[in-house]
Image: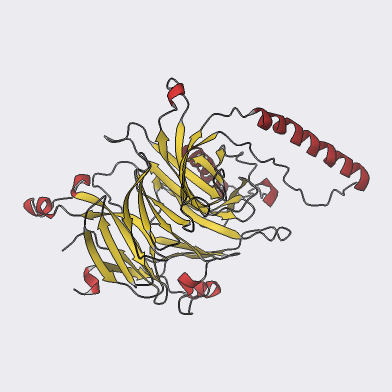
Amino acid sequence: MSKRAHTTELGSIACEELGELGAGKEGWLVDNPSLLCALDTHSLALANRSVIVVLGWAEPDSTRLKIRPELSPISAEFVTAIEWLVFDEIRVVVAGTSSGSLLFFSLAGHLIHKQMVYPARIIRLRVRGTKRDLSHETSSEEVCVVMPGIVARFDGSDIQNMLHQWFQETQSQFWDPNPRKRSSDDFGRSYGKLPYQLWSVSKYGTCADAAITGIMPPPLMEIQSSEHYYCGITVGEDAVISAFRLSEDKNRSLVGAILSKVVPATFSTIASLSKMIWRSDQTSPRKSDEKPQPFARASPLTCLKDFPRKGEKLTLSPSGTLAAITDSLGRILLLDTQALVIVRLWKGYRDASCLFMEMLVRKDTAASGSSYYEPTKSDYCLCLAIHAPRKGIVEIWQMRTGPRLRSFQCAKGSKLLQPTYRFGSSIASTYAPLEVFLLNGDSGQISVLNRTLN
């Protein structure tokens, strides 16, 4: 069967703006570990250490934008993670840095908000949510920030409120003949600090990737507790897989309480003495005096240690009940995040990447109806798309224990991508299944994996 039966070409990202990211050289998209990609419905954001390129691929004259974040030369700060945030009419690009900062940019290239999360390198930004339906009693939307041994969670509603405030201010300034200009120090203060929760998940070593899979039941002795508990999954070198119960409880241990009092007082005393001795001048740039937020409770649940195997990457299903984990031995582990057991294993997939998608397998339902039949959620089944670059193939497997539905060759230098989660999207009349895209870096072509088997 021809390749076209498996994918549908949608457009091209080829443009001269990509030259700064290394485009034009064979394998530029996959060979550079510093090159980051994030996909929206019709736009793509790519970043290297110091520049972010935003471009559309649906139309030839789509907007193209180049953003150069203001990074600290003292700490040799650089961009380490990138993702889209989509709230109905508001679309922004958020970047994480090696110093632990989040930078929110508008599609005009303006810095909206800057916030320090924790002074450590941001490895990954995860945007996910579950909406209230028959299978979920409550809705939950979040941005998860992953750092070595640390996980932070921002509630989607807090980010949405901040961006709506910015959007309204921008709209009002559009009609203002003398708009107020803000300095870079004003950003991150004008909209207030975004609240978030922070956990240390380094009991079993630093993590290479992590995710918050959803809300979990409280411990047996705290059944009547009204606070929320989240399940956190990490993968890394010392423990292939680790699981934690993450508490919203702000109460800390005695040591944490003492440190929270002693460290700020000590810092304040040292700062006062330094001012008296050196009398720092007023023209020196203002340095953020933010203290790292204290950690909330993270209780270890279980871990899998299997030296020399190392966990590398983690991918969550839409509901968060399944996680596909790749390791250093070329295996892919399918984890049930509620039972915390491995339910499936694939071997021989070194350097593989995985994304969950939905396939239309109930063809008889669609065929038996009218020509205007729109498939519903029950017509689709959850699948796992596996890209094995060493084999040069993409495979699609039915979850949890179903067969391989499809296997086809893909070009060298290709990468699997998935559009980011859309916050607060109203329930549409037709179901929008989870899709996976294939980007060929050498040709610039972007395609979508077909959802039907025929």
Q: How many marks?
A: 0
263 vs 438, nearest the viewer: 263
Q: Residue at x 60, y 55 (%)?
A: 97
Question: Observer-nearest residue: 113 or 451?
Answer: 451
From this view, report whether residue 96 is shown above or below residue 275: below
Instruction: Residue 107: give x, y in percent of width and height.
Output: 50, 57
Tell me how the rendering is colored.
secondary structure
In the rendered image, the vertical position of residue 63 relative to residue 215, given as above or below: below
Q: Residue furthest right?
A: 277
Q: Quadrant of the C terminus?
A: bottom left
- In the shown orientation, is residue 399 left or right of residue 70? left
Which of 415 and 342 lies nearest the eye of the viewer?
A: 342
Horizontal and vertical percent for residue 252? 61, 29
Q: Residue furthest top?
A: 224
Residue 424 at least partly seen = no
Residue at 55% from the left image edge and 33% from the top image edge: 297
Task: Write down the quadrant of residue 62 in the picture.
Answer: bottom left
Farthest residue in the front direction? 307
In this picture, residue 265 sits left or right of residue 370: right
Tell me the quarter of the picture where residue 440 sits. Answer: bottom left
Q: Is residue 212 left or right of residue 399?
A: right
- Residue farthest left in this picture: 368
Q: Is residue 206 visible?
A: yes
Residue 171 at x, y percent in the picture: 52, 46
- Does 105 sit above or below residue 153? below
Q: Position of residue 226 (x, y in %)?
A: 46, 23
Q: Quadrant of the N terminus?
A: bottom left
Q: Residue 57 or 59: which is nearer the viewer?
A: 57
